Amino acid sequence: MNILLLGSGGREHALAWKMVKSHHCDDLFIAPGNAGTSQFGTNLPIEVTDFEAIKKACIEYKIQMLVVGPEEPLVKGIYDFIRQDAQLRHITVVGPSAEAAQLEGSKAYSKKFMQRHGIPTAAYAEFTSDNLEEGKAYIRHHPLPVVLKADGLAAGKGVVIAATHEEALQVFEEMIVHRQFGEASSKVVIEAFLQGIEVSVFVLTDGQDYQIIGHAKDYKRIGEGDTGLNTGGMGCVSPVPFMDAFFMQKVEERIIRPTVQGLSKEQLDYHGFIFFGLMNVNGEPFVIEYNCRMGDPETEVVMPRLQTDIVSLFAAMDNGTLVDTNIVFDERSCAAVMAVSGGYPGSYLKNFLISGLETLETDGSAMVFHAGTREEDNEVLTNGGRVLAVTAYGNTIAEAVAKSKAVLENIRFEGIYYRKDIGYEFN
Ligand code: AMP
Ligand code: GLY
């Protein structure tokens, strides 16, 4: 079948790499894609939220499956758009309806969902300009640190962990009164700080059944030793040593199963990935957030470790046979190290030539997944903050990370920076 993949990051390059291995995949199209995705299919110059252009492409290229990488088109209703269009409704969409995507699109919605289904998460309250003073009083009495979250999508910047009440009050006003993130911060969730280790678990569901397709630990801070500003993710490792069968059983019983049962009970139309952002608090799992998509760079380690044909899984998700599928993982560890532009996550320059890509070994033990790259006159140029992720396999996490770094030593662009301590706790 012909498949259209929406997005342009390392996640999409890794999904493209995985999907073209499937004998179910005939022609692959990526909108808009990057210099890496064009190795596996045809990039189309279409924005992920331009639904009319997506419709035209679906018809022109006889698309039978639409795989949605980022959250924005999902929250804006791409699933519903396809379902409601007589010319498109036969297409299998990997991604939830707009309503179900609120699990990511609104922090308040997801907190209420978790409360309704008894899913462990941090205690919280939500406020708008209508109860601003109440919110301030709530903050003043809240133990420290306190976590403030813009309700809506804020490009990964909407969460602040405030160390003092003064800072929290300032952030609260900034979000609600000054609309720091526009409409997205007209409502703010204030929640208790959870002390622990973060881990992400990935599930594919049809809203009734599910399969766990992998997990990973992401390194979010720009600086080594987990210091400095938050980023989209600077690297990932999988499997995570503390995700043993005992902990995984708790995650499945207390979190994954009640979540999928909740979707089913509430008749939410959910055919796609669920990304469970979890905190391991002294061996007990809590949900920090849901995302309605795969993670980036988590996908760059989850796809390489997943041996099952992903397109078959998507088809099974669509026809109600997900429960009969068999998930097989590569036994090896996997690490992804993200190379970013100098200055990221602050301001940075683009359009630097990337060299060293052509001399990479091709024995399959390492892959370069492009994120912010573009092609011009047969050259690859930087085109974003996160530029590329190098994923490698190893017998241990340390070995996989060492291999990723060895590959990165041969890749150059002006201002290149990457963390050399990814997976440091597991050495
Ligand atoms: P998010 O934008 O929802 O992914 O949150 C960004 C980051 O904030 C998370 O990855 C966590 O590191 C941190 N975070 C969010 N909520 C909490 C919480 N309740 N306790 C501790 N850390 C949190
Ligand atoms: N790496 C975190 C995310 O994709 O949200």
Image (cartoon, grey):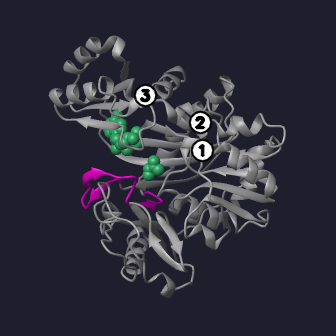
Q: Is mark 3 within 8 Å of ligand 1?
A: no
Of residues 137 and 198, the one nearer the viewer is 137
The amino acid type of the residue labelled 3 equals Glu
**Image x and y of residue 51, in percent:** 66, 43
Residue located 59% across and 44% down the image: 49
Looking at the image, tell me whether mark 2 or mark 3 is earlier in sequence order: 2
Q: Are marks 1 and 2 in contact (CB under 8 Å)?
A: yes
Inspect the magenta stretch and tell me whether residue 238 lies in it. Answer: yes
Of residues 130 and 321, the one nearer the viewer is 130
Q: How many marks?
A: 3
Q: Is residue 216 above or below residue 125?
A: below
Q: Is residue 378 above or below residue 294?
A: below
Left or right, 305 with reference to 179: right
In terms of image quadrants, where is residue 271? Answer: top right
The label number, if any, that marks residue 188 in the structure image:
none
Q: Is residue 21 above or below residue 287?
A: below
Quote the CA–CA distance across marks 2 and 3. Answer: 14 Å
Residue on which the image places disc 3: 183
The amino acid type of the residue labelled 1 equals Thr
Q: Which residues are magenta?
A: 220-240
Residue located 39% across and 24% down the image: 186
The label number, if any, that marks residue 76 in the structure image:
2
Secondary structure found at label 1: loop
Q: Are marks 2 and 3 in contact (CB under 8 Å)?
A: no
Residue on which the image places disc 1: 49
* Number of residues whose C-alpha sits closer than 10 Å to that of mark 2, classed few (under 14), some (14–19) or many (20 or more): some
The amino acid type of the residue labelled 2 equals Lys
Q: Is mark 2 within 8 Å of ligand 2?
A: no
